[in-house]
């Protein structure tokens, strides 16, 4: 799609402005078709609130988020009769189902099979036609019913319990590695380095280490392919993966920008992947402890790969190729080995019980067998 930014005009810009007015981010006045400074600021506010890249540009992600934000629960009948509905109304329905004790999965705003199954369960339990459609009768029931799940957010409790039940041992677990970009899309470039090539090499090093400790490892792409983020998420979902690790490096207009950052799913208002956040924090701390990369911390985002995966997913930005300092390190094979080791240790630490979890930056590969033996 065409990108829209400051200075552009036309019907699409008028539509964006109308949505921002409806959300209360622009003053209610006759809507014109000019992408002015007020529109730019309102869009950046919206992007920040929705966990998007705050760039003031209406690209595919921002446009989809704006379209989803128009809907409130009750505005339309929701079902999976045709294509899945996407919107804030779906997220509100999922939150309500979770509060009532029905497993709708993550409140990601996508009306998928898990949401439909949870809705049918509610309808059966409360004497409604179990058709998986959220119409007037189901809406009335949702408004009348009180909350059942207490003691924390329902999905947070489920994620924590699933992690506990999976056990401390890595053998048998499935991890999807997602080297960013690929094919003709080389990603960020600088100082003779290409993002796609760097993350392919990192994925190979990490794949070898994970396989050595018994993890089944799958890659979302080959050297010559570049699936969309939605396709990568679908691949992980179809594989029944336990975790997804998306590998990237960053770029910036300024050569002074540098450092490593980790991202997990989070849409604000308490909607987040708790285990994803935990894994992102572990990876970030291990990489920072084992290297001299600047700590750019952990952040929540609603990027498609993070939002559409049904398991904890983390995106790693492992340095800036436009920084002379970071680029020199990323070009070093030994440094890439250090990164791979840090990520491997973080994955293991995610599953270890608290009494066996070692301090950040000290665990080494030979210690895995001892830690696993002690946990059984």
Image (spheres, rainbow, N blue to C red):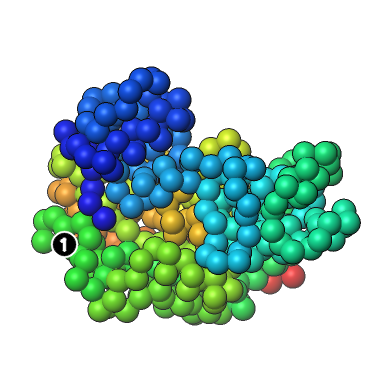
Figure check: 206 above or below 307 = below
| Residue at (62% x, 78% y) in the render | 172
In which image quadrant can residue 72 be found?
top right
| Mark 1 burial class by Cα count in 10 Å: few <14, some 14-19, many 20+ | some
| Residue at (88% x, 56% y) in the render | 127
Q: Position of residue 190 (x, y in %)?
A: 14, 55
Figure check: 234 above or below 25 = below
Q: Between 316 and 14, which is closer to the camera in this rendering?
A: 14
Tally of numbered tags: 1
Q: Quadrant of the N terminus?
A: bottom left
Q: Between 56 and 173, which is closer to the camera in this rendering?
A: 56
Asked whether, in this view, residue 111 is left or right of residue 66, the answer is right
Q: Position of residue 314 (x, y in %)?
A: 47, 56
Q: Position of residue 184 (x, y in %)?
A: 19, 71
Q: Between 68 and 340, which is closer to the camera in this rendering?
A: 68
Q: Is any atom of residue 118 visible in this view?
A: no
Q: Position of residue 55 (x, y in %)?
A: 28, 39
Furthest-left residue in this view:
192
| Residue at (41% x, 75% y) in the render | 219
Q: Is any atom of residue 222 visible in this view?
A: yes
In which image quadrant can residue 358 be found?
bottom right
| Residue at (29% x, 76% y) in the render | 225
Q: Between 76 and 214, which is closer to the camera in this rendering?
A: 76
Label 1's element?
strand
Find disc 1 in the rendering and name its residue: 193
Asked whether, in this view, residue 118 is left or right of residue 25, the answer is right
Q: Quadrant of the C terminus?
A: bottom right
Figure check: 316 above or below 35 = below
């Amino acid at each position: 799609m065409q990108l829209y930014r400051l200075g552009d005009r036309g019907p699409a810009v008028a539509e964006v402005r109308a949505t921002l007015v409806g959300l209360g981010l622009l003053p209610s006045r006759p809507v014109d078709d000019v992408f002015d400074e007020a529109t730019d600021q309102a869009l950046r506010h919206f992007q920040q609130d929705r966990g998007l890249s705050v760039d003031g540009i209406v690209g595919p992600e921002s446009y989809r988020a704006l379209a989803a934000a128009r809907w409130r629960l009750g505005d339309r009948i929701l079902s999976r009769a045709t294509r899945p509905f996407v919107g804030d109304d779906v997220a509100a329905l999922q939150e309500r189902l979770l509060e009532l004790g029905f497993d709708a999965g993550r409140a990601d705003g996508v009306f998928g099979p898990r949401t439909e199954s949870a809705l049918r369960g509610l309808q059966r339990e409360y004497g409604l036609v179990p058709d998986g459609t959220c119409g007037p009768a189901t809406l009335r029931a949702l408004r009348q019913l009180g909350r059942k799940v207490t003691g924390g957010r329902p999905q947070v409790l489920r994620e924590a319990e699933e992690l506990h039940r999976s056990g401390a041992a890595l053998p048998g677990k499935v991890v999807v590695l997602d080297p960013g970009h690929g094919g003709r899309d080389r990603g960020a470039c600088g100082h003779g380095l290409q993002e796609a090539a760097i993350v392919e090499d990192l994925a190979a090093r990490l794949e070898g280490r994970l396989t050595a400790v018994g993890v089944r490892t799958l890659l979302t792409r080959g050297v010559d392919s570049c699936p969309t983020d939605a396709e990568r998420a679908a691949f992980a979902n179809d594989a029944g993966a336990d975790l997804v690790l998306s590998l990237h490096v960053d770029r910036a207009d300024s050569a002074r920008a540098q450092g490593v950052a980790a991202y997990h799913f989070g849409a604000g208002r308490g909607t987040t992947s708790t285990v994803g956040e935990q894994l992102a924090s572990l990876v970030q701390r291990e990489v920072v402890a084992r290297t001299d990369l600047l700590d750019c911390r952990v952040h929540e985002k609603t990027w498609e790969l993070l939002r559409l995966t049904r398991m904890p997913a983390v995106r790693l930005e492992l340095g800036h190729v436009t920084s002379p300092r970071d680029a020199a390190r990323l070009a070093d094979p030994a440094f890439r080995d250090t990164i791979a080791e840090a990520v491997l240790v973080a994955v293991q630490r995610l599953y270890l019980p608290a009494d066996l979890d070692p301090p950040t930056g000290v665990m080494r590969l030979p210690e895995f067998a001892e830690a696993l033996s002690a946990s059984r």
